[in-house]
Image (cartoon, helix red, strand yellow):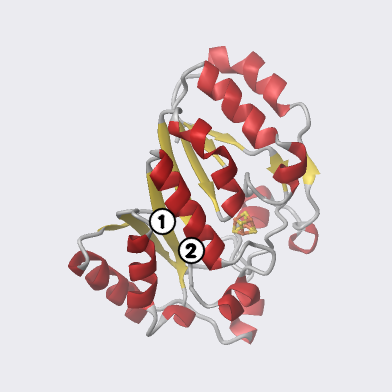
Amino acid sequence: MDYALNPYLGCEHGCLYCYGPGVLHAETSTWRVVRVKRNIPERLARELPAVDGIIGIGTVTDPYQYAESRFRLTLRCLEVLHRRDREIHLHTKSDLVARDAGLLASIRGVVGVTVTTLDDRVSRMTEPGAPLPRDRLSAMAALHDAGVSVYALVAPVMSTLEGHEAELLDAIRDTGVRTVYYNPLHFRNVDPTRMMRMGISGSDTARSALEGGGRSRGLDIRHVFKP
Ligand code: SF4
């Protein structure tokens, strides 16, 4: 990714492990208050001729959080990028992305969907405002079926995944997606207090099981983001 495009500032998903506030030096306590960049499609159209490279969408906030269903800024930015034939790398934790499957299939680039667990209870604990895992898996399948180049991101790999790695990999494979990235839990730019209070940590055991299980299932499994 050469550029970062974030139509919203702040994120309603409220993940415990979010590095967004740390990166942007924003207050964690108000991160779920979302600011809407209403004129971003127009600014993008104006500034795009001067830039060249891959546009990362949703680098510090989710481009398909609930605000998008009302404001449709990500969709309008995608339309601009499509008209200019720009390459994108979009990432989300929301099934709303499936709404734009047709458009995304006609844009150069890749789309990633995060899924860290299949357990609704764990998801509600760690990603309280995000759509449930089964909805994200359905969105992955819809994107894949539409012809979008999709990958699953298991990040961060938490201790809550221990013993459930195979189940998660099977669920991902059932969507048709064959590329899986993972990333260990690290606390750079993250306040670890709440996770530690819940007894959640990173897990080398789960990482190894993901790697081994991914390979044995014929998945392209990679550790891509270095802490
Ligand atoms: S979805 Fe991403 S940006 Fe939003 S709170 Fe979770 S980790 Fe942060």
The residue at the point 69 percent across, 64 percent down is 129
- When the figure is inspected, residue 196 is found, relative to residue 47, above or below; the finding is below
Is residue 45 or residue 101 the one in the foreground?
Answer: 101
Q: Position of residue 100 (x, y in %)?
A: 56, 38
Quarter of the image holding residue 153? bottom left
Circle 2 sits on which residue?
115
The residue at the point 54 percent across, 23 percent down is 81
Q: Position of residue 68 (x, y in %)?
A: 70, 43
Is residue 148 or residue 108 the one in the foreground?
Answer: 148
Secondary-structure class at tag 2: loop
Q: Quarter of the image containing the N terminus?
A: top left
Quarter of the image holding residue 77? top right
Cα gap from disc 2 to disc 1, whole angstroms: 7 Å
Residue 193 makes an appearance in the image: no
On screen, residue 184 versus residue 16, left or right, reads: left
The crowding category of the residue bearing disc 2, from other C-alpha atoms within 10 Å (few below 14, some 14 to 19, many at least 20), is: many
Ligand 1 quadrant? Answer: bottom right
Q: Earlier in the sequence, mark 2 or mark 1?
A: 2
- When the figure is inspected, residue 125 is found, relative to residue 44, above or below; the finding is below
The residue at the point 71 percent across, 36 percent down is 72
Query: Looking at the rendered structure, which numbered label has been put on residue 43?
Result: none
Is residue 124 or residue 170 the one in the foreground?
Answer: 170
Secondary-structure class at tag 1: strand
**Type of amino acid at the residue the image marks with label 1:** Ala
Circle 1 sits on which residue?
152
Q: Answer yes or no: do the residues labelled 2 and 1 have beta carbons within 8 Å? A: yes
- When the figure is inspected, residue 57 is found, relative to residue 191, above or below; the finding is above
Q: Position of residue 202 (x, y in %)?
A: 45, 76
The residue at the point 67 percent across, 51 percent down is 65
Is residue 161 or residue 99 the one in the foreground?
Answer: 99
Q: Position of residue 71 (x, y in %)?
A: 76, 38
